[in-house]
Image (cartoon, grey):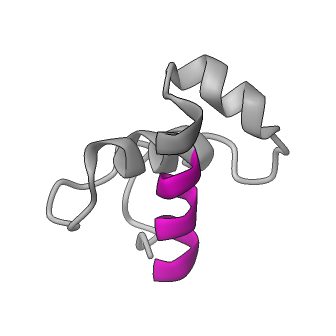
Amino acid sequence: MVPGSAEPSVRQDFDLREHDRHVLEFLSRDPSSQVAFQGIRRRLGIHPEQLSRALHRLADDG
């Protein structure tokens, strides 16, 4: 979980993989918005399987 003090750029001291960090930064820009899986994939240029795994890891970590 990212503390409230972390600005849109996720702090480097969290143990996140590169894709996890990119996804988290993207989603933290506007937390109240809804974005489809394909929209995230297109915006970040991440392979669907990599995005799926990143989302699962982030969800599991809370």
Q: Which residues are magenta?
A: 52-62
Across the whole image, how many numbered discs are drawn on residues? 0
Residue at x 61%, y 46% (from the top left corner): 27
Chief secondary structure of the magenta span? helix
Where is residue 52? Give x, y as percent: 58, 50
Where is residue 50? Give x, y as percent: 46, 42
Residue 25 placement, left or right of 56: left
Residue 33 placement, left or right of 28: right
Residue nearest the viewer, comparing 49 with 25:
49
Which quadrant of the figure contains the N terminus? bottom left
Give the residue at the far left of this rendering: 13
**Whether residue 59 is visible:** yes
Is residue 59 magenta-colored? Answer: yes
Where is residue 16? Give x, y as percent: 27, 60
**Whether residue 62 is visible:** no
Residue 4 placement, left or right of 19: right
Q: Quadrant of residue 3?
A: bottom left
Residue at x 56%, y 66% (from the top left corner): 56
Q: Is residue 20 above or below residue 29?
A: below
Q: Is residue 53 above or below residue 22?
A: below
Is residue 3 magenta-colored? Answer: no
Q: Quadrant of residue 11?
A: bottom left
Residue at x 20%, y 67% (from the top left corner): 15
Give the residue at the far front of this rendering: 49
Residue nearest the viewer, comparing 26 with 18:
18
Where is residue 31? Give x, y as percent: 70, 53
